[in-house]
Image (cartoon, rainbow, N blue to C red):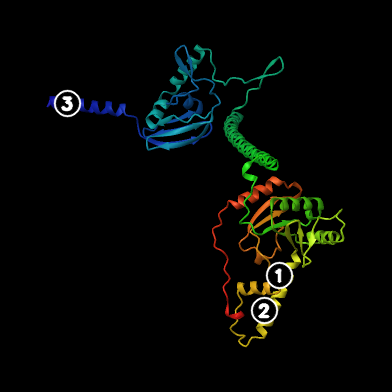
Amino acid sequence: MAAAAMGAAVVRRLHAAVAAAQPPRLRKLAMHPPKSVEVGFADGSTFHLSAEFLRVYSPAADSKIRSVAGEKVIFGRRHVGIMSAESVGNYGIRILFDDLHKTGIFTWDYLHHLGSNKFGLMRNYIRTLKKHSLSRDPQRRMRSDDNLGSLLVLPRADSLLKFDIISYMLISGIKISCSSMIVKLILGLLWCLVHLVISLFGSWSHLRNNLECYLISLKLLPKYRNLHLERLAYLGVVVDSREAKNALKVKQLLHWFSTIGINYLILYDIEGVLKELIQPSTEASTDGNLRNSLDVVADTKASCCRHGGMFMECLSGSDGKEAIAKAANLLYSTCSNSDNKSGIIFTEADMTRALKSVGIGGPEPDLLLVYGPARCHLGFPAWRLRYTEIMYMGPLESMKYGTIAKALYQFSHKHQNYEDPILFEGDFWN
């Protein structure tokens, strides 16, 4: 019996030792930012742990710890504050301090250890600071004036939190703005480089074209000396009405076409300036006065004339409207005289034959050279442009013989992928 009682006593002592070694369970956790944290445990103990005390004994590596004589010391945290806290599982919390330290995880056991030994740990901390001549107060910030260094007033605890947060935001904003400025600078440099390359390419192309036109004018390029114009039976030229008033340029242009060997030339401007310019010259040429003329000889039609061995036809915007009206009247009169009026359908071939019947059909130019804006050829008879190649030559003021020779050479070597136009005969004209 004595042995049994002794064994029971030993077991009770062991259970008591184990219970004493294990910390009690957490019962209460209250945050009082920015000053302190209150924790309570099942054994009835309650501890108020200050923000400075928790920051100094944070269980995490800190880049702001100073190593003094081989010993790591945290100092200047008297006014540190608690910003927020978040739970980590069901065993601890992570506290965010206003000096942006947030890597320390405080377990319930560690908080009980800190609370149970708070005064001893705090005395050891103050003794360590005095040993290394450090202070719990934060360091004073220095400002350099011209030749004298003046000390700033130490901020209070409530303003220190705001200052640290604003400093962090400013530093982050400066980093972001610097990154965006670098990106914008790189994009700007790339844009300037692309613009420079395109400008150089355009300048080189313009210089090369001018040099080639100059060499063609001097007849130094063999392939442009003899132009094969077998495919070019009819050449059309459109001139902007404002530029068509320059008689010297028009005369020079006609002289070049006559020299190249053009047989049939169709001139057009929407206001009829060329027609008015050439017709008085035709009258002067028939009277024998060649001083201010364009050296043309009148043909049977008022809008047709000759320049040397080249036959010319002059058109204006009103000619197309007049031609459409005459052809429509002819079709209407033919339809009125027909017995079967209900089943009549007009086709493009019918309109073409009607235009030829009133004498306004005319040949289709194989190539149309446009001097002036891109839309200045509007009003040219559309029924005469079905299979026409159109080239824009720029303003008449800057015309060159070389550009004309190049255009005719390119046309003579261009493959046109369409068959000859065929007009289908209809029952309407039978």
The dot on residue 391 is none
Which image quadrant for residue 170? top right
Visible residue check, residue 246: no
Q: Residue at x 74, y 60 (%)?
A: 312
Q: Residue at x 58, y 19 (%)?
A: 139
Q: Secondary structure at mark 3?
A: helix
* 420 left or right, relative to 208: left
Relative image position of residue 80 (x, y in whole percent): 54, 27
Relative image position of residue 118 (x, y in whole percent): 44, 24
* 15 left or right, relative to 58: left
Q: Which residue is mark 2?
A: 331
Q: Earlier in the sequence, mark 2 or mark 1?
A: 2
Q: Nearer the viewer, residue 136 or 244?
A: 244
Q: Nearer the viewer, residue 145 or 23?
A: 145
Visible residue check, residue 68: yes
Query: What is the three-letter code of the residue carrying label 2?
Result: Leu
Is residue 171 positioned above or below 300 on the image?
above
Mark 1 and mark 2 in contact (Cβ < 8 Å)?
no
Q: Which residue is mark 1?
A: 360
Q: Secondary structure at mark 1?
A: loop
Query: What is the three-letter code of the residue carrying label 1?
Result: Ile
Cα separation, mark 2 vs mark 1, equals: 14 Å
Relative image position of residue 144 (x, y in whole percent): 67, 18
Q: Secondary structure at mark 2?
A: helix
Is residue 180 positioned above or below 390 on the image?
above
Query: What is the three-letter code of the residue carrying label 3?
Result: Gly
Q: Which residue is mark 3?
A: 7
